[in-house]
Amino acid sequence: MKKIALVPGDGIGPEVISSALRVLNAAGFDGELVEFDIGYGRWRRDGKAITDDDIERMKDCDCILFGAITTPPDPGYRSVLIRIRKELDLYANIRPLRSSRIDVIIVRENTEGLYSGLEMLGDEEARTVRVITRKGSQRIAEVACRIASERKHLTIIHKANVLKSDVLFLKTCREVAERYGIRYDDMLVDAAAYNMVIRPEMFDVMVTTNLFGDILSDEGAGIVGSLGLCASANLGDRWALFEPIHGSAPDIAGNGIANPVGAIRSAAMMLEWFGEMERAQSIHQAVDRTLSKGVKTPDLGGLCTTSEFTDAVIDEMRRA
Ligand code: NAI
Ligand code: MG
């Protein structure tokens, strides 16, 4: 039986994770769940957001299903998610964006770039080191090429004209794409940000560095229609973490109106990672049918609560 570390987290995290669990259950998935109380709520209670022991216990699980965690702008608080990504070496962040306007998978490098953690902070000058390695670029390009080889083509997104560290990223991605024999091209990140809005159909699979991927995927979520709709997988060679791309949404937390689609589709991506393609498919299709009937939470202009929407998805699964 698969062992899943469950991290409901803060704000709307527990609300959307509870929907995802109900849907997994309805799909007939049976796994062992190990719940972790980590995040900002825990930090406020006992001064620790996550411990070394939590990380060790996570490594004892197959993967993590994650809601969202609040990261306050307090210099003493280190992002829990960034720590987990680093410790479990979850180097590939896969973000599918799908709607009537766009059908793209963003493959974001998740461990280096501008999120290297190498910061030199002074009152007059502050620096963050952007780290691009051949190994890091190679392994993210491999993931992107594997995905692109089953789709149409790959676009390498970079800023190599100004950031010379991106020359290494671009060159390495091109080498891997050549080796895979896939169709590929490249584009500067600012042009890509523009084109995603104007002609999203020109993109299929996009591979990019950490910060660019972070920003472009939120932009993509805007094109899809709501942050609440989008799911992601953080993959390493041994472990994986599945999470909606939104945060803890303190502005709506506790109201029972969060859109659970991102969390539900993240759970379906987890099933795909386990090789349970049919169950995953049944979840995605039930969500598609529910949305196409106009059953929607308020972020999409609907009137449903989180649990009413989840009921509707489960009804669709039973009917199929
Ligand atoms: P956010 O994603 O939490 O919210 C942005 C806006 O989108 C808000 O108006 C929110 O109500 C709306 N929204 C987000 N998810 C929604 C959903 N499922 N249904 C309906 N509406 C939804 O981003 P924000 O406000 O910048 O960050 C809030 C907190 O979350 C911060 O502490 C931030 O650090 C943290 N955060 C955590 C992430 C994670 O755990 N992976 C990712 C992004 C932010
Ligand atoms: Mg982000």
Image: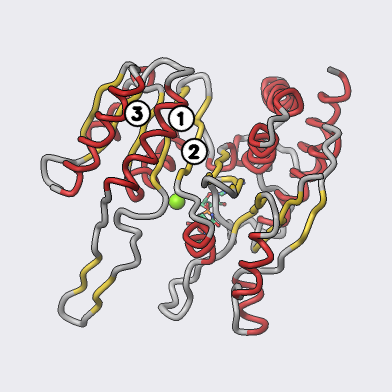
Label 2 vs 1, first from the N-terminus? 2
Q: Left of 177 or right of it: where is 297?
A: right
Residue at image coords 66%, 37%? 261
* Residue type beneath disc 3: Val
Residue toward you, 27 or 271: 271
Element under label 2?
strand
Disc assigned to residue 94: 2
Instruction: Identify the coloring.
Output: secondary structure
Question: Of residues 118 and 97, which is closer to you in this image?
Answer: 118
Q: How crowded is the residue under tag 3: few (<14 C-alpha within 10 Å), some, or many (20+)?
A: some
At 65% across and 52% down in the image, what residue appears? 64
Left or right side of 45 for 196: left
Dot 1: element: strand
Vertical relation: 51 (above or below) 132: below
Marks 2,1: beta carbons within 8 A: yes
Cα separation, mark 3 vs mark 2, equals: 20 Å
Instruction: Judge whether residue 51 can be spotted in this image.
Output: yes
In three-dimensional space, the C-alpha distance between marks 2 and 1, rounded to whole angstroms, equals 7 Å
Q: Classify residue 247 by image quadrant.
A: bottom right
Question: Which residue, given by chain and number where applicable, does mark 3 sit on?
Answer: 197
Where in the figure is residue 10, as x and y percent of width and height? 64, 63
Q: Is mark 2 within 8 Å of ligand 2?
A: no
Which residue is tagged 1? Answer: 105
Left or right: where 125 falls relative to 28: left
